[in-house]
Amino acid sequence: MVTMDEIVSLCKRRGFIFQSSEIYGGLNSCWDYGPLGVEMKNNIKRLWWKANVQLRDDVVGIDSSILMNPKVWEASGHLQNFADPMADCKVCKKRWRTDQLSEYKCPECGGELTEPRMFNLMFKTFMGPVEDESAVVYLRPETAQGIFVNFLNVQQTMRKKLPFGIAQIGKSFRNEITPGNFIFRTREFEQMEIEYFVKPGTDEYWHKHWIEQRINWYYKLGIRKENIRIREHGKDELAHYAKACVDIEYLFPMGWSELEGIANRTDFDLSRHQEHSGQNLTYFDDETKQRYIPYVIEPSAGVDRSLLAFLIDAYENQKIDENDTRVVLHLHPAIAPVKAAIFPLLKKEELINKAKEIYSNLKYRWIVQYDESGSIGRRYRRQDEIGTPFGITVDYQTLEDNTVTIRDRDTMEQVRVHIEEIVPYLEEKIEVKF
Ligand code: GAP
């Protein structure tokens, strides 16, 4: 299996992910997405949106603000409960989450630990010019609350009937005690969340439905089945709002770890918001003529964690023959940052002109690259390493019959295709049938 160091190194070398503020020595656990990383991240978000919003008649999207009225966090329970137990090593002064320790001593130096204290994970800041308690606001630790407080706005304006969902993609912030493993656990990250509102009593059915949907999304995008598993939370590890929760776990280099959580949040959040805001957040059921607070099923995925899983799953250091190896990312074409690279076989004007013409046409549809430098073999390898699924080469035959070769990244085989057929050929392979 690939190591995290290999992934970090590829990400830096090829412009996927850089350390944040690197020229100043970086900032712990903060990362910047480079030109290829941002394309890949956008692809993941678009594919999630497509599967969960565009293709579903029962889910609509929103984009709520990161800063919210602090009463939201009182109502949601985050001010009181969103905390991890933390202790410091009396010898080396390192700080640890005590619920993650197998023995109560410092995992690094074996030193004695202080008594555990609860540490709230929300980032605090001030709104406006006066820095006193009344001006405190929080950076949201989950996108979910922006959905709950808009439940009625969306339900009424979209005239939605249960069951229906509201989806959102956006940044969340947590002052994690022990961030790490590259982009796996950071203090600023992006979430893709759905709050799916259902009639109480149907919640267990919908919970199963969403677990299935979400696993299939990863499968459709090429994640290997043996690297995904489901783990049900024990009663002692459930979040303060959940009746049940299932994690989709991925086999990361550091072991099986959470990729996505799918929780049954019951009517906890809407009830609390109704209580704290004094607004009536019940739903009127036309069929039964009853008013009630819906239950909620919540599939909650991390954009950064998904991107990391897709990279790890796709990475191969492949031995081609006795003298030749290559690093190749077998990314699904829909996820790959660059869809195709266009090469003139040789640096000759007539080949260059034709290749640039093809490049100009394709870039209207996809992110593609044009490359004329170095041997054709080296150009293929550069693209293999960033996961570009197709290499389109213009040669002398192209000038005679308007055909090009298209090389497949994984098999390295080539087919001859008429120039007019390039778009349908690529489209068929890039499009995901969810
Ligand atoms: N609204 C529910 C919720 O936020 P969570 O299990 O705390 O649930 C959901 O987070 C997902 O968000 C996780 O499965 C993970 O993919 C991502 N996530 C959470 N904390 C993260 C962090 N510190 N760094 C990166 N991703 C994180």
Image (cartoon, rainbow, N blue to C red):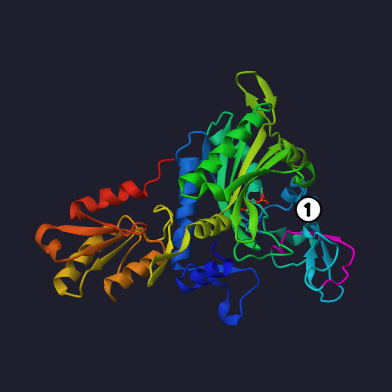
In the rendered view, does 39 fall on the left or right side of 24? left
Q: Position of residue 254 (x, y in %)?
A: 64, 61
Q: Position of residue 109 (x, y in %)?
A: 81, 74
Q: In the current view of this chain or complex, which residue is farthest to the top?
A: 288
In the rendered view, does 220 fall on the left or right side of 276? left
Asked if the magenta segment contains residue 113, the reply would be: yes
* Vertical side of 65 occupied by 295: above or below: above
Say which quarter of the image contains residue 112. bottom right
| Residue found 66% across the figure and 72% down from its top | 28
Q: Amino acid at mark 1?
A: Leu
Segment tinted magenta in the rendering: 110-127
Residue picked out by circle 1? 79
In the rendered view, does 360 fall on the left or right side of 252? left
The secondary structure making up most of the magenta span is loop
> Within 8 Å: ligand 1 and the Cβ of disc 1?
no
Instruction: Please identify the quadrant where the C terminus is shown.
Output: top left
User: Helix, strand or loop at disc 1?
Assistant: helix
Q: In the current view of this chain or complex, which residue is farthest to the bottom?
A: 24
Asked if the magenta segment contains residue 143, the reply would be: no
| Residue found 50% across the figure and 50% down from its top | 223
Q: In the current view of this chain or complex, which residue is farthest to the right?
A: 115
